[in-house]
């Protein structure tokens, strides 16, 4: 693990190296024919990728970064990937620095819509294209594309997952841990799972213990929030709708600390920790989003734009409250103990040696993993 400081220093160094790397010519006016495959990579402008943090989910550094990097390398397009470590002003500075250093396209996972819109406006003013990566930036006319998953579908899978895991248990007491209130995805996930679980609360089949958002998806805060929920409810809980694997693991840790029994907990991201929790019976499901495909789709768009071409991809409009943004949305899938095996071996799915460790060894063998 990097300390914050070392990490920031490395990032800063990365930005500087990017600046020093080349003072490439201005490729703007290459006239860009309609062909998707005119291979003139030498003409491509630079791309900057702005990742949000490394703690709200391990995905950003362990999956998104390497797959984005690979996609740009394969295309011979220069790309610099930086991470704002949760700091909005750092992300704004990284964007400005990238533009100063000659970036023609910015691929951004925002930290909230306000700072994301400011970055996009500044980019647009300088003729730089902006792609929203995974998180939609609301209320801006300055973004060009959006690449993500069908995030309401992610939420519906979580809601249905909890319903399946709880079976016909009557009177189940359920706690809800939402993602960050400033992440549009968290709103979409919630719309999705609420459309499934609210019926259970309304019919009286389930009882809602509490429903709280976790600022910045901060796992430590999730632990505190969940502990307070337990405290308030005399340690009685039968199920947890947790919006990602990090929040799920916070809830699982709290249950373990109090020596409470395992209960169904949902998740998202199919992280190694989440899959191990599923194998051990601590977590009931996660949502696997094929990040390799997401990274590739975003990189393909960025590469075309960096070459001054019109991207040849099928998009659908997603409204960001100011305009319809041409979007590529991929399909998520649910993962439970029963289908882990299907996805093992996918390049963006955790490796066996990272899942089947310690206590999980025996359970892995049982599942034939
Ligand atoms: C992403 C999730 C991730 C969460 C926390 C969301 O915007 O879609 O995959 O777990 O942010 O980083």
Image (tube, rainbow, N blue to C red):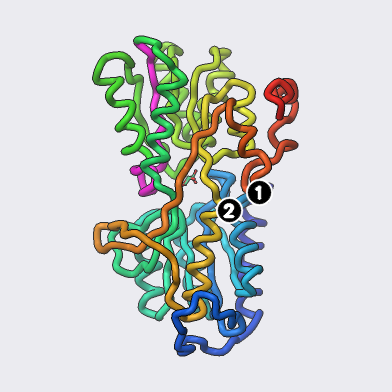
Residue occupied by mark 2 = 292
Q: Position of residue 204 (x, y in %)?
A: 27, 14
Vertical side of 327 occupied by 364: above or below: above
Q: Is residue 341 left or right of residue 176?
A: right
Q: Quadrant of the C terminus?
A: top right
- Mark 1 near mark 2, Cβ–Cβ under 8 Å? yes
Residue 220 seen:
no
289 and 252: which one is in front?
A: 289
| Quarter of the rendering containing residue 124 | bottom left
Q: Is residue 219 left or right of residue 319?
A: right
Q: Residue at x 59, y 69 (%)?
A: 80
Q: Is residue 142 left or right of residue 22?
A: left
Residue 172 is inside the magenta segment: yes
Residue 141 is inside the magenta segment: no
Q: Residue at x 26, y 63 (%)?
A: 323
Q: Position of residue 44 (x, y in %)?
A: 56, 80
| Quarter of the rendering containing residue 196 | top left
Local secondary structure at mark 1: loop
> Which numbered marker is on residue 347?
1
Vertical side of 145 occupied by 30: above or below: below
41 and 321: which one is in front?
A: 41
């Amino acid at each position: 693990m990097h300390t914050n400081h070392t990490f920031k220093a490395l990032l800063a160094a990365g930005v500087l190296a990017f600046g020093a790397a080349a003072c490439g010519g201005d490729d703007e006016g290459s006239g860009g024919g309609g062909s998707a495959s005119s291979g003139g990579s030498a003409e491509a402008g630079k791309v900057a990728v702005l990742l949000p943090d490394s703690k709200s989910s391990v995905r950003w550094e362990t999956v998104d970064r390497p797959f984005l990097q690979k996609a740009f390398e394969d295309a011979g397009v220069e790309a610099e990937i930086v991470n704002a470590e949760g700091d909005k002003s750092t992300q704004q500075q990284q964007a400005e620095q990238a533009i100063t250093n000659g970036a023609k396209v910015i691929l951004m996972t925002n930290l909230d819509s306000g700072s994301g819109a400011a970055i996009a406006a500044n980019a647009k003013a300088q003729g730089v294209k902006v792609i929203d990566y995974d998180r939609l930036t609301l209320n801006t006319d300055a973004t060009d594309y959006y690449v993500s998953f069908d995030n309401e579908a992610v939420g519906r899978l979580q809601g249905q997952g909890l319903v399946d895991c709880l079976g016909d248990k009557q009177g189940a007491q359920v706690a809800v841990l939402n993602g960050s209130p400033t992440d549009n995805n968290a709103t979409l996930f919630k719309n999705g799972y609420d459309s499934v679980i609210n019926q259970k609360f309304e019919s009286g089949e389930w009882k809602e213990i509490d429903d709280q958002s976790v600022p910045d998806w901060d796992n430590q805060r999730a632990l505190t929030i969940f502990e307070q929920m337990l405290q308030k409810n005399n340690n009685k809980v039968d199920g947890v709708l947790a919006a990602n694997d990090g929040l799920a693991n916070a809830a699982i840790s709290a249950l373990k600390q109090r020596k409470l029994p395992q209960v169904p907990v949902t998740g998202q991201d199919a992280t190694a920790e989440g899959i191990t929790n599923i194998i051990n019976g601590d977590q009931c499901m996660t949502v696997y989003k094929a990040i390799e495909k997401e990274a590739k789709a975003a990189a393909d768009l960025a590469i075309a734009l960096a070459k001054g071409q019109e991207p040849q991809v099928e998009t659908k409009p997603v409204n960001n409250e100011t305009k319809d943004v041409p979007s590529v949305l991929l399909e998520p899938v649910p993962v439970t103990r029963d289908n882990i095996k299907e996805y093992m071996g996918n390049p963006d799915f955790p490796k066996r040696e990272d899942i089947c460790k310690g206590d999980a060894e025996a359970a892995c063998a049982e599942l034939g993993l």
